[in-house]
Amino acid sequence: MSAIHVRPAPLIAMAGLALGSLMLVSWHRLNLPSTPAEPQQQLTQNIAKQVDLLFVDQADGGVLVQRSPDAAVLAQILVGEGGFVRATLRSLIREHPGPALSVQGDNSNQAQSITSARHHFRLAMTEQGQLLLWHPLSGRVLDLKAYGPSNRQVFLEFLLASESTP
């Protein structure tokens, strides 16, 4: 039988690589800023335009897009349309659902109660052209550029409509 001979050079090299990796990670972690910027601070830095939006679920399954301060209607997303907008909002609302609001409507002289959810979001564009969607309840901020130009354009139209709607 032959004895197993272990050469120390590869083991020393592997230990050195592991130790070097740990030192590099430690150095990097020590040189990071102590606290990351809060989402609210990110939204106030270099903002060129912004609008507070309400997305109101309708009884027929549509979604009404309103400007928050004055409830001016900017757009209406019909049933079966606006898949990206619906999916994006759902992903943000899932963490912290907004309160349901009871709305009284008058239809054919009969008052009917419709429960609809109203969800508040802030849409902002930075001076560099970055379009951000912020959900205040969850604190999450989405950079809409990451979802492609056509999906970003949908939210950009809400921002442009808010400027042109009196």
Image (cartoon, rainbow, N blue to C red):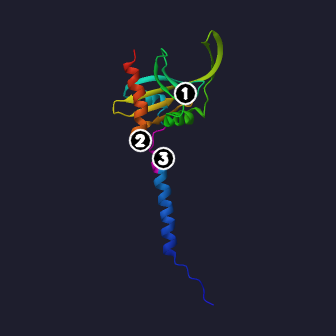
Question: Marks 1 and 3: in contact by CB < 8 Å?
Answer: no
Name the outermost residue toward the bottom: 1
Label at residue 29 = 3
Q: Secondary structure at mark 1?
A: loop
Residue of label 1 = 62
> Is residue 65 part of the magenta span, yes or no?
no
Whether residue 24 is situated above or below residue 15 in the rendered picture: above
Specify start and end residues of the magenta stretch as a single range. 27-34
Circle 3 crowding by C-alpha within 10 Å: few under 14, some 14–19, many from 20: few
Q: Amino acid at mark 2?
A: Gly
Q: Is residue 123 left or right of residue 113?
A: left
Single out the mark in the foreground, 3 or 1: 1
Residue of label 2 = 148
Question: Marks 3 and 2: in contact by CB < 8 Å?
Answer: no
Whether residue 68 is situated above or below residue 18 in the rendered picture: above
State the quadrant of the N terminus.
Answer: bottom right
Single out the mark in the foreground, 2 or 3: 2
Q: In the rendering, at what x and y percent does residue 62 appear? A: 55, 27
Q: In the rendering, at what x and y percent does residue 166 appear? A: 39, 14
Kindly identify the residue that appears in the image at 59 percent across and 26 percent down: 60
Q: Amino acid at mark 1?
A: Gly
Kindly identify the residue that appears in the image at 60 percent across and 34 percent down: 95
Kindly identify the residue that appears in the image at 50 percent across and 60 percent down: 19
Q: Earlier in the sequence, mark 1 or mark 2?
A: 1
Circle 1 crowding by C-alpha within 10 Å: few under 14, some 14–19, many from 20: some
- Mark 3 and mark 1: Cα distance apart in space: 47 Å
Q: Amino acid at mark 3?
A: Arg
Q: Secondary structure at mark 3?
A: helix
Q: Earlier in the sequence, mark 3 or mark 1?
A: 3
Whether residue 139 is situated above or below residue 149 in the rendered picture: above
